[in-house]
Amino acid sequence: MKRAFYRICEVLLALIFLGAGLNGYLVWFGFEPIFPTSPKAMEFLGTGYLLALVKTVECLGGLLILTRRFIPLALLMLLPLIVNILAFHIFVDPELLPIAMVVVLLESTLLFHYKENFKSLLSVKSKTDLSA
């Protein structure tokens, strides 16, 4: 039961980011977005390198989670974007704040689930033996 719950969280988070990433590429190529976007966010990201960079990370993170490859890495890749999304919707555009809260909840749940993978990153002393 627990495994199914975490898998559902993975699929939801992956689909949200994969959809948002592909949606951003549509905007970048000059098409109308399929899913609703925040006009203020699109104004902030513009149509240059920042939009392409953010949307590429979103697509890559979503694909990695969806295919269950390098999930802890994908969660860490998406974490700065999620913090930025939450801050943006709290301070600039609160209209899509509920979706941002769902994303934060999914990410937090999965970070907790994969916490064993992050313990070495949070250790005070690093391992000096590189031969292992």
Image: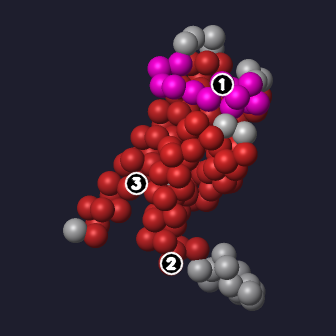
Residue picked out by circle 1: 39
Residue 4 against residue 113 in the figure, above or below: above
Quadrant assignment, res 89: top right
Q: Which mark sits nearer the N-terminus, 1 or 3?
A: 3
Instruction: Locate residue 106 relative to residue 78 in the image: left or right.
Output: left
Q: Which mark sits nearer the N-terminus, 2 or 3?
A: 3
Instruction: Locate residue 76 relative to residue 20 in the image: left or right.
Output: right
Which residues lie in the magenta part?
33-45
Q: Is residue 39 magenta?
A: yes
Quadrant assignment, res 125: bottom right
Q: For the residue labelled by badge 2, is the local secondary structure a helix, a strand or a loop?
A: helix
* Residue 69 visible in the displayed image: no
Q: Nearer the viewer, mark 2 or mark 3?
A: 3
Residue placed furthest toward the left = 1
Residue picked out by circle 2: 116
Q: Nearer the viewer, mark 1 or mark 2?
A: 1
- Whether residues under marks 1 and 3 lie with C-beta atoms below 8 angstroms apart, the answer is no
Q: The residue under label 2 is which amino acid type? A: Glu
Distance from the alpha carbon under mark 1 to that under mark 2: 39 Å
Distance from the alpha carbon under mark 1 to that under mark 3: 27 Å
* Residue 65 percent location from the top left of the image: 45, 51
Residue 30 against residue 22 in the figure, above or below: above
Residue 132 against residue 91 in the figure, above or below: below
Distance from the alpha carbon under mark 2 to that under mark 3: 17 Å
The 10 Å Cα crowd at callout 1, few under 14, some 14 to 19, many 20 or more, is: few
- Whether residues under marks 1 and 2 lie with C-beta atoms below 8 angstroms apart, the answer is no
What label does residue 10 carry, if any?
A: 3
71 or 34, which is in the foreground?
Answer: 34
Quadrant assignment, res 8: bottom left
